[in-house]
Amino acid sequence: MADTAISNNIRKLRFFHNEMTQKELAKKVGVTRQTIIAIEKGHYPPSLELAFRIAHVFESPLEEVFSYDPKKDQF
Amino acid sequence: MSFQEKNITVTLVNFTLILAYFLIRVLQMAATETFTEPNVFRLWVIIIVAAVVVTIAATILTQIVSAIIEVIQTGDKEPEIEDIADERDKLIDLRGTSITYTVYSLGVLVAMLTFAFGQPPLIMFSLLIFFGVLAQIVGDISRLLLYRRGF
């Protein structure tokens, strides 16, 4: 369940990329598996740099991986 | 549980034991009327040295235990331990440090107030070390909670 205004399709994208594991994705973007889990669950919004790195791994544009819901933003 | 979480847990347990030892020694001194300058400052040194040694030992111990667990779980002879600190780890550490400093600042204020209201300086020095260790414990608990929550 997402805690932040940013949601993502990482789980789906991992599945469509030869069922890439969280550990493999973590290694490719230089973070721990726990951080990937937190991002996937929507508990942690990644930095812009990490978001771009994840999008680059999936060869997708950023908005295909992450989406922003202004209604959920507590700003 | 990540390497960082394990490391914080080990440090938390050790600092809790240090705090317990400190409180027992202070109460013993108070009961036997040996709450004197040499005894209190000796206790200061013991606590500070123990805190430094414990912090280093905790990291080494966590590394060894993590490697053993990884070997048992995967059967891999060259285990891969995720001991990197990524952006989330750094942010959590930053928040924990902020909480530690806040608690310690309040502790220093309380310690100084006891002196200002006429208590002997030894009370102030004892409270300074007490709040130093307590602040570390509170900071570690908050770090663990942030890890459990995600961030």
Image: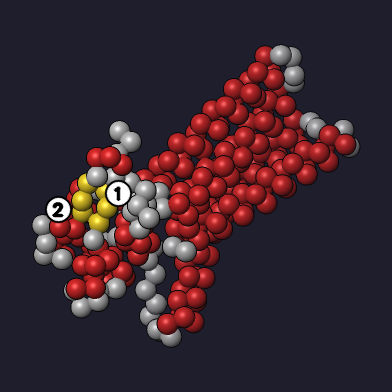
Q: Check the picture and name the quadrant holding the N terminus of chain A.
A: bottom left
User: Label 1 is found on which chain of the structure?
Assistant: A
**Which of B88/B66 is in front?**
B88
> In front of the other: label 2 or label 1?
2
Residue B109 in the image: above or below residue A42: above
Q: Is residue B91 left or right of residue A51?
A: right
Q: Position of residue A16 (x, y in %)?
A: 19, 73
Q: Check the picture and name the quadrant holding the C terminus of chain A.
A: top left
Q: Position of residue B135 (x, y in %)?
A: 57, 38
Residue density around tag 2, few if under 14, some if 14–19, many if 20 or more, within 10 Å: few
**Which of B62/A48 is in front?**
A48
- Pointer 1: what residue? A45
Q: Amino acid at mark 2?
A: Glu
Say which element carries label 1.
loop
User: Label 2 is found on which chain of the structure?
Assistant: A
Q: Position of residue B105 (x, y in %)?
A: 54, 28
Residue B93 in the image: above or below residue B2: above
Confirm whether residue B118 shows in the render. Answer: yes
**Which of A11/B4 is in front?**
A11
